Amino acid sequence: MQIKDLTVADPALRLRGRGAASNVAGRFDPYAREPVSDGWDIPEDERLLRTEVSEEVPRSVITRNNSPDIPFDRSLNPYRGCEHGCIYCFARPSHGYLGLSAGLDFETRLSAKPEAPAVLERELSRKGYRPAPLAIGTNTDPYQPVEARYGIMRRVLEVLSDWNHPVSIVTKGALIERDVDILADMAARGLAHVGISVTSLDAGLSRRLEPRAPAPVRRLATIRTLSEAGIPVRVMVAPVIPVLTEPEIESILAAAREAGARAASWILLRLPHEVAPLFRDWLDRHEPGRAAHVMNRLREMRGGADYDAQWGKRMRGEGLYADLISRRFSLAEKRLGLDRPLPPLVCSRFRRPPQTGDQLSLF
């Protein structure tokens, strides 16, 4: 289903540091809402749109998938929605399942799972559980600003460390440096990898694309901090946006390699469902001179559409221009020594941690 209508934000709202400028009608919503003047010329007080956080108690926190183009079969997300506000985020449509918009709601109406560590431990303790790398940060960033208040991610890592369970983390957040002590210890046991997403080295462009995410130079500093602590780090050039960020592929890889990254990956811009109209609206507001060029290049790699969700195509696209990007990336990562995989995560150490009252072992 193609979403065509955007619901404009309340004119009295001040959208400071937000990626979207509207609340696009979700694909499950039967109606779109739009503010209309009632004819009374009465000035309203401007108010800042602030982030709201609700709490939920999940019955399960490990999500399974069998997608053929994803290298993991289970993931965990401590939060729903993401305050980073990246306009291109493919996870925005997931807010529709909550009856909320993929637009401003996704950035400002968040849901936290404070009980996630306890629920995770319960799931790991089930008799039939078999370990495999757990991916965190695949839908929303576990180190977004609200994590500083809730600390859910640190407690999740403590559970995983106690159980010797392997984990792979994806983030833009510099707050991950808070947990270097746990991650370094896990990495020494072959239990942890981290992927840091760097979309652009242009601070101005990054601020517009990802308004509440750390600046590019700060993410490179995070790569350095993690690498110096012995934690294997992959730089993720994601998403690659034709015309806007695609010219920076080589320079991003070089900067990340200099900061200590050991491997690299890339994903082409994805615009599923409500994300397409939100991104087109962002282009019209922030890059009007290049908007048509960006979308034409993207459609060239998506079979003429804004997006193609087919397995094997959604991450890379197809056609001459997609092949060119892939070739450029491969040559650059090989030249920089980033074409080797990170060390494999270890599953054989997984075991139930000692409990109070357990009989001690002699060996």
Image: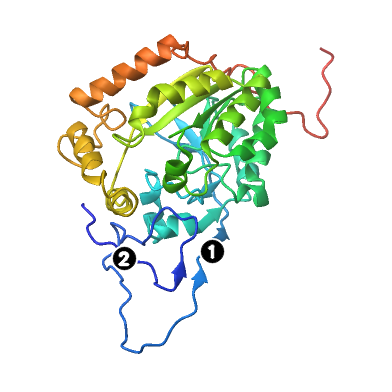
What kind of residue is marked 2?
Answer: Thr
Quarter of the view holding residue 269: top left
Crowd class of label 1 (few under 14; some 14 to 19; many from 20; radius 10 Å): few
Cα separation, mark 1 vs mark 2, equals: 18 Å
Pick the front one: 284 or 167: 284
| x 29%, y 23%: residue | 325
Looking at the image, how many numbered discs can be counted on the residues?
A: 2
Can you see residue 70?
Answer: no
Residue found at the very far bottom of the displayed protein: 40
Q: Earlier in the sequence, mark 1 or mark 2?
A: 2
Quarter of the view holding residue 97: bottom left
Crowd class of label 2 (few under 14; some 14 to 19; many from 20; radius 10 Å): some
**Residue contact at pointers 1 and 2, CB within 8 angstroms:** no
The residue under label 1 is 50
Residue found at the very far left of the displayed protein: 304
The label number, if any, that marks residue 7 in the structure image = 2
Can you see residue 266?
Answer: yes
| x 48%, y 51%: residue | 81
x and y percent of residue 275 in the render?
A: 32, 49
Pick the front one: 39 or 354: 39
| x 37%, y 43%: residue | 90
